[in-house]
Image (cartoon, rainbow, N blue to C red):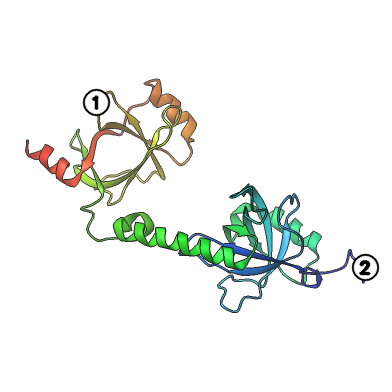
């Protein structure tokens, strides 16, 4: 059979590789690759033969994002981050690649980490699961978007204008400048904007932030520039602290 007519299923999967991903998502501990992992620029095809895998496809395509070495004294300690895509085993490799390019990155199943073998993947997955489970126990609202329980241990915001009152929030701090921090209302108060992104600009007063919403047709860069240059009115100004601190401020 001509190599040009060979299908994805007919490739030689001669290399074992371990893979792990973010907790809570599907994970296959061991896969077989059509080429050595690392240094790829056109991607690698994979066969998923794991009986306990929740990957929704027997054949996959992986496109590398980044490569690192955990321990330079151990040549097998490499880690490759890659996006994986489901592919049809009856397609030719060229057609499978073309279909992925046509559909775009939004169709990736997940971003996963490849390592030298399944044993390493299992160890890294166990470590990640432990961290994830601890975070979920301490801050369930971070790992569960549908969480509706007690937010007492979360950060809270008090809207100093009085429009939105007091509500639990999550503040993701970034390098400032040039980036404004990212702000999310865990339990949005009445009237809270439906914008997918709200930016928090620190004020000269400690724990006070001006909030700016990014509209559906706006981008973060333009909103940030307008906010820093005073060309945009803030949604509101909030004080951020623990629930006890915010309650104490309200009573003082």
Identify the element where label 1 is drawn.
loop
Q: Position of residue 129 (x, y in %)?
A: 44, 63
Q: Residue at x 30, y 51 (%)?
A: 186
Q: Residue 193 at x, y = what percent?
A: 33, 43
Q: Quadrant of the N terminus?
A: bottom right
Determine the residue located farthest toward the front in the rendered image. 73
Quarter that holds the C terminus: top left
In the displayed orientation, state which residue is furthest to the top: 229
Count of numbered circles on the image: 2
Residue located beneath label 1 in the image: 205
Name above or below for residue 153 compared with residue 27.
above
Residue at 60%, 63% in the rendered image:
19
Say if 42 sits above or below 206 in the image: below
Q: Residue at x 28, y 49 (%)?
A: 188
Q: Nearer the viewer, residue 139 or 165?
A: 139
Q: In the image, is 12 to the left or to the right of 126? A: right
Q: Is residue 164 visible?
A: no
- Separation (CA) of disc 1 from disc 2: 71 Å
- At label 2, counting other C-alpha atoms closer than 10 Å, the crowd grade (few under 14, some 14-19, many 20 or more) is few
Q: Secondary structure at mark 2?
A: loop
Percent position of residue 238, x then y: 24, 35
Question: Is residue 210 something that shows in the picture?
Answer: yes
Please tell me which of labels 1 and 2 falls first in the chain. Answer: 2
**In the current view of this chain or complex, which residue is farthest to the right?**
2
Q: Which residue is mark 2?
A: 2
């Amino acid at each position: 059979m001509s190599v040009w007519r060979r299908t994805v299923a007919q490739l030689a999967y001669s290399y074992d590789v371990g893979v792990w991903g973010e907790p809570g998502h599907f994970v296959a501990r061991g896969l077989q690759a059509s080429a050595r992992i690392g240094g790829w620029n056109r991607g690698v095809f994979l066969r998923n033969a794991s009986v306990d895998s929740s990957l929704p496809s027997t054949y996959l395509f992986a496109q590398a994002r980044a490569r690192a070495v955990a321990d330079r004294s151990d040549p097998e300690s490499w880690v490759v981050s890659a996006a994986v895509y489901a592919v049809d085993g009856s397609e030719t490799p060229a057609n499978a690649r073309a279909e992925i390019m046509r559909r775009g990155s939004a169709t990736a199943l997940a971003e996963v980490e490849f390592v030298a073998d399944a044993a390493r993947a299992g160890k890294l997955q166990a470590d990640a699961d432990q961290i994830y489970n601890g975070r979920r126990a301490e801050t369930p609202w971070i790992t569960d978007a549908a969480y509706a329980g007690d937010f007492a241990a979360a950060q809270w915001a008090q809207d100093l204008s009085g429009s939105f009152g007091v509500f639990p929030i999550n503040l993701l701090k970034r390098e400032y400048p040039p980036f404004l921090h990212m702000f999310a209302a865990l339990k949005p108060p009445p009237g809270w904007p439906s914008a997918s992104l709200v930016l928090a600009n620190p004020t000269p007063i400690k724990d006070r932030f001006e909030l700016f919403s990014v509209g559906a047709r706006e981008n973060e860069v333009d909103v940030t520039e307008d906010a820093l240059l005073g060309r945009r009115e803030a949604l509101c100004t909030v004080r951020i602290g623990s629930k006890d601190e915010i309650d104490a401020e309200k009573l003082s």
